[in-house]
Image (spheres, rainbow, N blue to C red):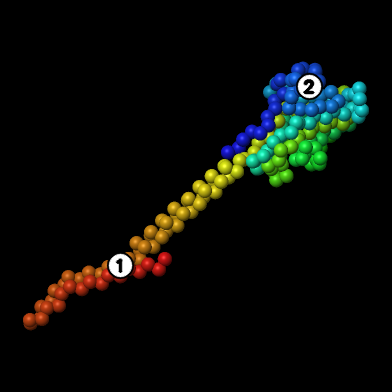
Amino acid sequence: GTSTLFSENFNSAKLDTEFSNIYTPKWDQSGGVQGSYGGNPYGKAADLDAGSNLYPPDHTEVLTSKNVSTLGYHSITLKYDRRVIAPLGAPMTLTVDYSPNGGSTWTTLEVVSTSSPWTNKTWSLSPSADNVSQLKIRFSIVGTDGTDHAYIDNVPVTGVSPEHILKIIMKKILLSTALILLVSGALVVGGTGAFFSDTEISTGNTFSAGAIDLKIDNTS
């Protein structure tokens, strides 16, 4: 069936503290991504804001997953919850993209530039993310100042194994075979006929008795 290949709810993140390999080992960050509640009903979330940075690029924060392996899996799906705060006069963009090759190339899933409440998003990453060893997910914000925020939470990546697909195919084959046998059996029964006569007629000293006509007609 469907297996979870990657999952993150950010509950291990420290509040108002930059992500690190100690508390959020599944991610790399730049610009100062921190743990926050951000009005999240599920607990902690990743908080990307567009405040000033000590190092360039300024007003930019990026959260990128470590490599996720989908080897042996197909029908790859990404989900996440997001909330965006983009005040008037402080334009910003949240960009979500993924890479099937460790960051060599990226495919953009969405770009958000207006405020929105907590929203669940679901994306199919197949076929490009099928059966790869270096899938990456990236969230990035570019904005005006620290009033711009993008909150991210509940990030699973799931896939379907070939064994599950094979089981479905075999089940369909077995059902088709059973149906063929059932229809063939009905044709055999319907094509078999028999005629019996045990009438005896006596005319004078001549007797006429017993007629059997058996026919098997199976043209299937």
In which image quadrant can residue 8 be found? top right
Q: Quadrant of residue 95?
A: top right
Q: Which of the two labelled residues, at mark 1 and mark 2, occupies the earlier sequence position?
A: 2
Task: Name the side, left or right, on which 170 lies relative to 41.
Answer: left
Gap between marks 1 and 2, in whole Å?
A: 83 Å
Q: Nearer the viewer, residue 203 or 207?
A: 207
In the rendering, which numbered label is found on residue 193?
1
Name the residue type under label 2: Ser
Quadrant position of the N terminus in the picture: top right
Q: Which mark is residue 20?
A: 2
Q: Is residue 57 at least partly visible in the picture?
A: yes
Taking the image as drawn, is residue 117 in sight? no
Q: Nearer the viewer, residue 135 or 182?
A: 135
Question: Under tag 2, what secondary structure?
Answer: loop
Secondary structure under the numbered disc 1 in the rendered image: strand
Residue at image location 91% in from the left, 25% down from the top: 55
Q: Give neighbour class at mark 2: few <14, some 14-19, many 20+ (Cα, 10 Å).
A: some
Name the quadrant of the C terminus.
bottom left
